[in-house]
Image: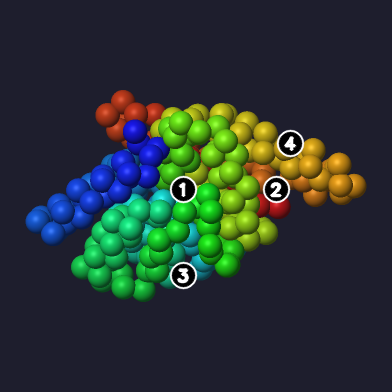
Amino acid sequence: MLGLHNYQDGAYAEDLANYHERSHADDWFGTEAMDVLVGWTKNLCFSKDLPGCSVLDIGTGSGRLLQQLAKQGFSDLTGIDYSEAAIELARNLAIRDGFEHINFLVDDVLESKLERRFELVMDEGTLDAIGLHPDGPVKRMMYWQSVASLVSPGGILVITSCSRTKDELVQEVENFNQRKLGAMVSEGALASDAVVFKYLDHVQAYPNVDGICIATVAFLHT
């Protein structure tokens, strides 16, 4: 099952073998969709006066997204994945392609050990994979709590999904804010302080990718 750790390790171990044999690794969303995402993200960061922002890629996989962002001028780049095989693959590809400055770490977003925040946090399919776990609903709630501690105040979270629509992702964020509101009001905090993320923008359209519907939504960390 896609959401399980051993499945992910096996998938990236196969990609790592492909790398050693053919210097090739597959991109799950496709090159055209990647180009749209990267161009849109760059424009979004410039519009928010974050042209050289620090970037964290959650569930980085092969690290291709960070490579493409590096080509657009981003330099403070970190990728995390709970799969050691994925991180080894990402490092090998980065070295091969001249992006040795990208930092790759083995880290589980649900139990992250990172001690810094980032101005831009990217998620390309990781929330989807978490949702496929047998304990998906609980782990999705853990995801939002963890990600809230990784995005800098005033920073941006960009989520790309092929299992949720834009409206469904916005609703999931609203549900998270409501949970925070309930917890904080019971402690006497102001209701306005409970709004962690708010909708910022979304990709209007992607090229057709084998009938897959892709949604990318940006949220501002307040």
- Mark closer to the chain start, 4 or 2: 4
Three-letter residue code for mark 4: Gln
Three-letter residue code for mark 3: Asp
Quarter assignment of residue 195: top right
Residue that carries the numbered disc 4 in the rendered image: 178
Residue that carries the numbered disc 2 in the rendered image: 196
Residue that carries the numbered disc 1 in the rendered image: 123
Distance from the alpha carbon under mark 1 to that under mark 2:
17 Å
- Residue closer to the observer: 80 or 220: 80
Could one spot residue 176 in this view of the protein? Answer: yes
- Mark closer to the chain start, 3 or 4: 3
- Residue closer to the observer: 129 or 172: 129
- Residue closer to the observer: 133 or 39: 133
Q: Is residue 117 left or right of residue 196?
A: left
Q: Residue at x 26, y 59 (%)?
A: 89
Distance from the alpha carbon under mark 1 to that under mark 4:
22 Å
